[in-house]
Amino acid sequence: MRKRIPTATTKRLPLYHEYISRMEAEGSKWVSSFMIANALGLTPSTIRQDLKHFETIESSSFGYSTKSLKKVLENALGVTTGANMVLVGVGRLGMAIVHHKKFREKGFVIKGLFDVNEDLIGKRICNVPIYPLGRLPEIVKKKRITIGIVTTPVESAQYVTDLLVDANIKGIWNFVPINLRVPPNVAIENVNLCPSLFLLAFRIKLLEEMP
Amino acid sequence: MRKRIPTATTKRLPLYHEYISRMEAEGSKWVSSFMIANALGLTPSTIRQDLKHFETIESSSFGYSTKSLKKVLENALGVTTGANMVLVGVGRLGMAIVHHKKFREKGFVIKGLFDVNEDLIGKRICNVPIYPLGRLPEIVKKKRITIGIVTTPVESAQYVTDLLVDANIKGIWNFVPINLRVPPNVAIENVNLCPSLFLLAFRIKLLEEMP
């Protein structure tokens, strides 16, 4: 079925998914095409046309069912199968990510941690073992790892990324605020919290301007 | 000047800002309306119409200057002035956020930390003092705090949010994966890393499907 979905629609799916996740977190049971359009700066008819490609979305006079739409989008995005991941850089941020339960619930499981700190190697965090960096190629292969999470200091981030790429990782989830170079066959997603904070500042400004 | 910008355009500005920040991080000097449109599922003409409201964006035959466009958007979003913030919940994630330097560079400064752990109170992290929760109203008032960052355990998040709201905070930056209730005059932004991870998984899928 995915073959027939136009490219333009495909590109909008992650946007829809992010919006729906937000709405679900806020407790909304239904979302209308008007609400989605309004939030994303699109037209309601674009939303309706796009979502027509998915026949199984539950809807009512209130709009689409948030839960059903989220599920359909996750299927279309191919994120329902999850992935095995490793995390490199067991600092404060790395620790916080390992303790986060949400990814695991979705099938995205951290199978190994890597650090250069000798004191950490051999220990476990949330039952995930910490390995020396030298064992990365072996573990990635053995545990069928597809995603590498980079939470190292800035200075080591490119070196670690190169190691991950050489170990045939398929995607890099980068938490380090620099531009990492990866070959075109490797996907990369940079986490940047600034836009989220700026959006909050913008919302505060809009509220202050209200009569 | 902002008065004349249509609401629909205003709603798209945070999307543009997020895209531009990403492009800047990836080292792009120029972005075209076609690139922005393509990434966000909009039409190039919508982008051009929207950005016409800002006369000072530097452009060339390659498109808009990334740096100039980012600056103009940040002005329009009202995020150039920054804000004073407090953080409640000095755990792993809280610590990681305090150590993050990017917000401070943009004028968003954490002025106080709060926790219930007696062992932490009186200490400093990155030179920011940790106070007992009871001092929150006083510190928020004295230091002109407008944003409260919530990084507590799930169980305490709503209680802490209520304290922040009662202390006349204007916005909540929520890192806890639950739906917090705030009155309509308080802005809220929920940080959720799942969409970012799903986007990575989606990109990997697209790369795998390529011939």
Image (cartoon, coloured by chain):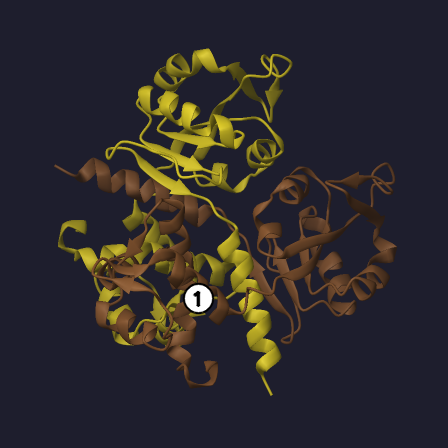
Chain colours: A yellow, B brown
The image shows residue A74 at horizontal and vertical percentages of 35, 49
Which residue occupies the foreground of this view, A202 or A80? A202
The image shows residue A128 at horizontal and vertical percentages of 55, 22
Identify which residue is drawn at 33% across, 74% down: B50
The chain identifier of the residue carrying mark 1 reads B
Judged left or right of residue B30, residue A178 is right
Residue A93 lies, with reference to residue B17, above or below; the image says above
Residue B167, can we see it?
yes
The mark tally for this picture is 1
Under mark 1, the amino acid is: Leu
Residue A81 lies, with reference to residue B176, above or below; the image says above
Judged left or right of residue B132, residue B68 is left
Q: Residues within 10 Å of mark 1 (few under 14, many from 20)?
A: many
The residue beneath circle 1 is B73
Residue A190 lies, with reference to residue A43, above or below; the image says above
The image shows residue A37 at horizontal and vertical percentages of 35, 72
Secondary structure type for disc 1: helix
Identify which residue is drawn at 48% across, 59% down: A22
Judged left or right of residue A170, residue A132 is right
